Image (cartoon, rainbow, N blue to C red):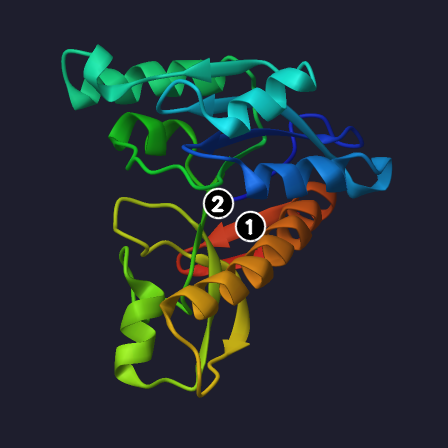
Amino acid sequence: MPGPLSSPGAPARVVVLLSGGGSNLAALLAAAEEPAYGVQVVGVGADRPGTGGAAMAQERDIPTFVEVVKDHASREAWDAALTDQVAAHAPDLVVSAGFLKLVGATFLARFEGRYLNTHNSLLPAFPGMRAPADALVHGVKVAGATLFVVDAGVDAGPIVAQVAVPVLDDDDVETLTERIKVAERAQLVDAVGRLAREGWTVDGRHVRFGA
């Protein structure tokens, strides 16, 4: 499955989905200020009103939208509405930057191979919401973060990039989580830029940079 850019030579069009303050969005926007980075954030969507990330986008005149699950008759209707909102911006990539909702079959079919998410573990170890805590309970010496292509599983899609974060003897959940976030953010910025500039291919479980 190739991941060509819609307009070769032009910045890749990226839509960011979020649920909170938008620290990952801020990092992407800062990187995108450099033309050589190769990315234009063309839309920002949220699953709730009043997010700091959406406010950040509005300050920069980036179009924003909100799709709240309870505003729709069913989860499938919400998924279809979210799909339409994102598709209206004709993205090359869609990035989940702290988006706390699982998308459905309609969204995944429309953006197959182009929807990215980050997770605060070295997948397939420790999927789910408690990854740093689970890592500490298991006594691992290395934790980290994974950027992956979203599929119908939970934190189960093909891996784009991973970064290791050593677990220190005096780490607790808070300190480990914060160090992972720093590494996760840098990895996201680096990998999205490479995907934008080089293109990518998804072949089964394997994601390769370069068109």
85 with respect to 152 (left or right) = right
Q: Is residue 193 left or right of residue 105?
A: right
In the rendering, at what x and y percent does residue 108 appear? Answer: 34, 34
Residue 167 placement (x, y as % from top left)? 46, 81
203 versus 173 height, above or below = above
Can residue 67 be seen here?
yes
Q: Is residue 179 above or below residue 46?
A: below
For the point 32% across and 54% down, the residue is 155
Which of the two residues, 106 or 50, is positioned nearer the viewer here? 50
**Disc 1 secondary structure class:** strand
Distance of mark 1 from mark 2, alpha carbons?
Answer: 6 Å
Asked if the residues shown at circle 1 and circle 2 are in contact, with their CB atoms under 8 angstroms apart, the answer is yes
Q: Does residue 62 sit above or below 34 in this rendering?
A: above
Find disc 1 in the rendering and name its residue. Answer: 201
Q: Disc 1 or 2, which lies upstream in sequence?
A: 2
**Image quadrant assignment for residue 34:** top right
Q: Position of residue 148 (x, y in %)?
A: 45, 53
Residue type, numbered disc 1: Thr
Q: Is residue 63 left or right of residue 154?
A: right
Q: Quadrant of residue 15?
A: top right
- Give the residue at mark 2: 1
Report crowding for label 1: few under 14, some 14 to 19, many 20 or more residues within 10 A (C-alpha): some
Residue situated in front as seen by the camera: 50 or 87: 50
